[in-house]
Image: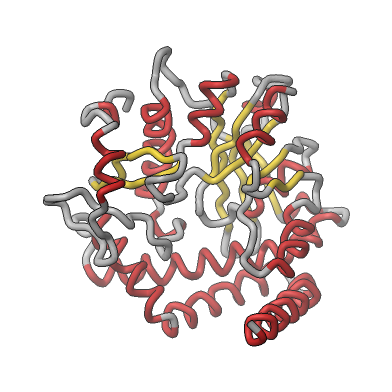
Amino acid sequence: MQWKRIRYRLEWLGVKMLTVLIPLLSRRACAWLARFVGRVAFLLDKKGREVTLANIEAALGDEYSAEEQLRIGRASYESFARTMLDLFWAPRLQRAGWEKYVEVEGLEHFDAVAGKPCVVLCAHHAGVEWTGLACGLRGYCGSALTQAFKNPLLNKFFTQMRGSTGQVILTQKMSMLRMLRRLESGERVGMLIDLNVSPTQAATVLDTFGMKMCATYLHAVLHLKTGARLVPMTADPRPDGMCKVTVHPALEIPEGATGQEIAQIAWNFLEKLIREKPEAWMWGYKHWRFRPKGATHRYPYYARESGKFEKLLRAVPEESGAAWE
């Protein structure tokens, strides 16, 4: 317990230093540092590298050679480093002239649903931390669902950085109720949809890269309860330090679609983007913790069979995942 308190304090001190030092960098320097940190982390993080490469091989092994998979994995680490360093740099966006650092495209899709409930869909994709920040700068503020840190000392720092341009940051505590209330008042709420969750939580089974994923479908439930439009948003960090944020058209949801089918529609949109630029996704997460019994498709080494996952899988008709592609 004593060591944990010491570790938490050291983590707090490290984050505090980053909040002071990173904003001093130019955008080009920040982008260069992210590439350097990402490459070093990929080299030193043995366990994380193993998960990353296992995921890429299972999902894209038929499309890329071993050498190309290694390149994608290394670039994914660089993308993650860039995403985090950009968040620490974010206070600089509050100064005049922020337009030269970030471009926002597609805001007309927010205008089309103005005053109506809207769930903004994001993923663990490069630049995701700047999506909400950029919209806030353009006057399109809303709420964003985030996961609290195990170290409570860090939550204040990240909440301040993520909300520095007007966003309201929500934690997962009573998230469903809080998001419902905001949607019912016509607000926008944002969330990550590529979260792997336990079969005992609010989860469904999705077809992802030929594998079954136990994933959240909170966004689908919110759509069913409020009629909220589901609007994807992505970011594209550039080597020169700039970042382009894109608001995509609302997803077309067929009448009568189930929660699982809605979640699958959202995933299909995301998977298309990942396949187009795989190095931008965070492959280091254990996205496929569970595998079906007797699965013939290769799964990452960490995937395991689970009776609870099988029960959830039986509740999802085999054809429903592809019915609305």
Vertical placement of 40 versus 307: above or below? Answer: below
Percent x, y for residue 136? 76, 43
Taking the spot 55% from the left edge, 52% from the top edge, the residue there is 236
Nearer-the-camera pick, 179 or 280: 179
The quadrant holding residue 233 is: top right
Percent x, y for residue 27? 70, 67
Percent x, y for residue 58? 24, 58
The quadrant holding residue 121 is: top right
Left or right of 174: which side holds 268? Answer: left
Taking the spot 64% from the left edge, 58% from the top edge, the residue there is 148
Vertical placement of 2 versus 195: above or below? Answer: below
Left or right of 247: which side holds 276? Answer: left
Quadrant (top left/top right/bottom left/bottom right) for the C terminus:
top left
Nearer-the-camera pick, 171 or 322: 171
Quadrant (top left/top right/bottom left/bottom right) for the N terminus:
bottom right
Evaluate whether residue 209 shows in this view. no
| Colouring mode (rainbow / by chain / secondary structure / one colour) | secondary structure
Left or right of 320: which side holds 100? Answer: right
Farthest residue in the right direction? Answer: 96
Vertical placement of 14 versus 81: above or below? Answer: below
Vertical placement of 155 versus 138: above or below? Answer: below
Farthest residue in the top direction? Answer: 255
